[in-house]
Amino acid sequence: MVATYKDIRRLTGLSLATISKYFNGGNVLYANRVLIEQAARDLGYQVNDFARGLRSRRSRTLGVVLAELNSTFNTTIVSGMEERLREAGYGAIICDSRGSAEAEAEAIHFLIGKMVDGLVIIPVGDEVAGLDAAHERGIPVISVDRPVANGRADAVVVDNRAAIASAVDLLTGSGHGEIALLAGPDTLFTMRERRIGFRAAVEAATGRLPRRELTQADAVSIEGGYDGMRRLLELDHPPTAVVCANYEFTLGATMALNELGADLPRPAIVGFDNLDLARIIRPRPTLVVQPVAEIAARAAELVLSRIEGEREGEARTVVLHTRLVVGDRATFALPGAAS
Amino acid sequence: MVATYKDIRRLTGLSLATISKYFNGGNVLYANRVLIEQAARDLGYQVNDFARGLRSRRSRTLGVVLAELNSTFNTTIVSGMEERLREAGYGAIICDSRGSAEAEAEAIHFLIGKMVDGLVIIPVGDEVAGLDAAHERGIPVISVDRPVANGRADAVVVDNRAAIASAVDLLTGSGHGEIALLAGPDTLFTMRERRIGFRAAVEAATGRLPRRELTQADAVSIEGGYDGMRRLLELDHPPTAVVCANYEFTLGATMALNELGADLPRPAIVGFDNLDLARIIRPRPTLVVQPVAEIAARAAELVLSRIEGEREGEARTVVLHTRLVVGDRATFALPGAAS
DNA sequence: CCTTGAGAGCGAAACGTTTTGCTCTGGATC
DNA sequence: GATCCAGAGCAAAACGTTTCGCTCTCAAGG
């Protein structure tokens, strides 16, 4: 049988109220404190979260809904958040919506039923169904990586346009005139933003917008990056440089490049995310690196502050900045250009 | 305010006991059934899991502890399991132990405190601390990918020795005599098993054990695979073929090979896991493919049957089998050998 | 006609906490 | 010496379910 306050009362002679106070950080005499600690240890006592939650209406559990679990970027963030939340005594129930808005709504419903104290979402699209129920119940919602258009949710995002612009600037600064973007469809916030940033940066540097076939959308996957890069290479006028809009594109594009014979000219390339890549691939690639650790930290911080502190107030958006980690010159320089 | 049974009672005139029966699939008259459904819909009723759990001592929540969240193999399995569990009405609290046995024990303690009905673990090492508390409370434990030496836990694993043997056989059958293994340290069950399988298969085919420097342990990461492959290539007598013991090694090794100039002889290679790779890389690599979907399904099945069915009885171990997906001949053939 | 048993429903007692008042004590303040 | 206040503790009432033991009804079996 599992121990309860009553067992502790039996061993210490204290009342349930005092014992409860102890376990919730209230003022308890030192002698009694020791008594309770001793009894709890002897009994192997662990607080019953059901009873606690029933009374206090707090579960100390958060819901996390991901558009895609099988993505390094997402898992890195989840892993970082999970660590911080667990330190604060919170657990995370994780649901994978597999890119389906329907599964996403279902997951949110499920999590609300599980009485989560807060919701962290990497949304599938711009609108998220099922958030009304969360707001009704006063459950704070934080979106990560992509903002939510409907409902008022806090958000942690990066400055996607500036991110891509930093990559483009490096390339135009090296003399490239024909730059392509490997990215997904505009239905995804990040892809849309990065494409906008790309077009603006190219126009600012060269005075004209990039050709349409250089900013076409591919499937967001390693395979999509691979196919996209091959498509670019087979153009009549292939680009001299390619910017990849996320990790999957970067990996797929790199694989496609690696199959290239020495006969074809190798385009310059700037990748996205995952600094590990730079540690491995030689020559070292240039990467737009997102501050994943900070994204995770800020998201965890934000959701905790909404739960424990001010629940009301304007929705806040935290915008973080990417970093351009420049790799070996050979990977981005225009062949034959002056330094 | 959130609705309760009392509100439903008010609207239907039925007793709490009958309403409870309805929500737990008991026998309720059709007319009353309709009444309750109507009231529940009007009230936006959702069962309070705290009250239910407090009384019934079941949380309908599982704990999942991963040695590493940031690994495609693990996330694929978790994602598959999570889907199946959610269908059955169960949620999963996921904890990442980041390869630390200490964090693992902490996570298990945490999850038991959350009153999980079952525990699924991809363990860090051979022994897992903190399982006693789970057994005491009658919480079933399932280990995935690697068995647990202490405590009696069910397990879902693959036949690692046969998996590697199938790769070695393909290579020796193609005439290779000097084959290397890229794998992690023997402290990890899977790595140990794969190394054992490797040595046995090489000995069976060639009559002698592989040289020590061909089966050395590297760090289990993309970087480890990259470094290991470079190390092998720089040997005085480099192997003519390399078997990679998991996905990270495969990816790292492939990247190292891709940097190879045309001057050096390119060794044959057999990779592990992640069929996506085969769809992308050209020439198509040969891969030992683990049945991830089935692993996830069997693990979910197993834990649910332990929760809902027979809790007692011998610990069961499910052994699944890998599949060798043969790629382009050029990637594994011995140059100049007869077909 | 009596018994039996299944179907359907009910009231009340748990389940293990937190929380709300309340009392009591022993200084500090006036 | 009276008053106040903070610290520490207590009893009892929630919280929203499930479950135990009962009753009632109706049909089938003897």
Image (cartoon, coloured by chain):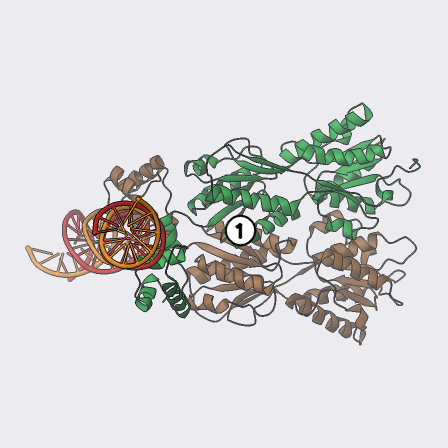
Chain colours: A brown, B green, C red, D orange
Q: Most extreme residue toward the top, as rendered? A: B207
At a point 65% along the width and 54% down the height, the residue shown is A71
Where B269 sits versus A242, above or below? above
Instruction: From the top left corner, tell me how far across and down residue B44 is, in percent.
Output: 41, 67
At a point 34% along the width and 35% down the height, the residue shown is A42
Q: How crowded is the residue under tag 1: few (<14 C-alpha within 10 Å), some, or many (20+)?
A: many
Where A44 sits versus A215, above or below? above
Instruction: From the top left corner, tell me how far across and down residue A55 is, in percent.
Output: 33, 55
Q: Chain of mark 1?
A: B
Question: Along the line of sight, which residue is nearer the eye, A89 or A66?
Answer: A66
Give the residue pinned by disc 1.
B85
Image quarter in which the N terminus of chain B is found: bottom left
In the image, taking residue B316 as reference, residue A252 lies left or right, namely right
Question: Along the line of sight, which residue is nearer the eye, A319 or A78?
Answer: A78
In the image, taking residue B68 as reference, residue B119 lies left or right, namely left
In the image, taking residue D15 as reference, residue B87 lies left or right, namely right
Instruction: From the top left corner, tell me how far across and down residue A281 is, in percent.
Output: 77, 49
The answer to whether residue B39 shows anywhere in this view is yes
SS category of the residue bearing label 1: helix
Instruction: From the top left corner, tell me how far across and down residue B67 is, in percent.
Output: 58, 42
Q: Amino acid at mark 1?
A: Leu
Quarter occupied by residue B136 = top left
At a point 55% along the width and 46% down the height, the residue shown is B300
At a point 43% along the width and 54% down the height, the residue shown is A60
Where B62 sits versus B9, above or below? above
In the image, taking residue B148 as reference, residue A253 lies left or right, namely right
The answer to whether residue A325 shows anywhere in this view is no
Quarter occupied by residue A12 = top left
Image quarter in which the C terminus of chain B is found: top right
Q: How many marks?
A: 1
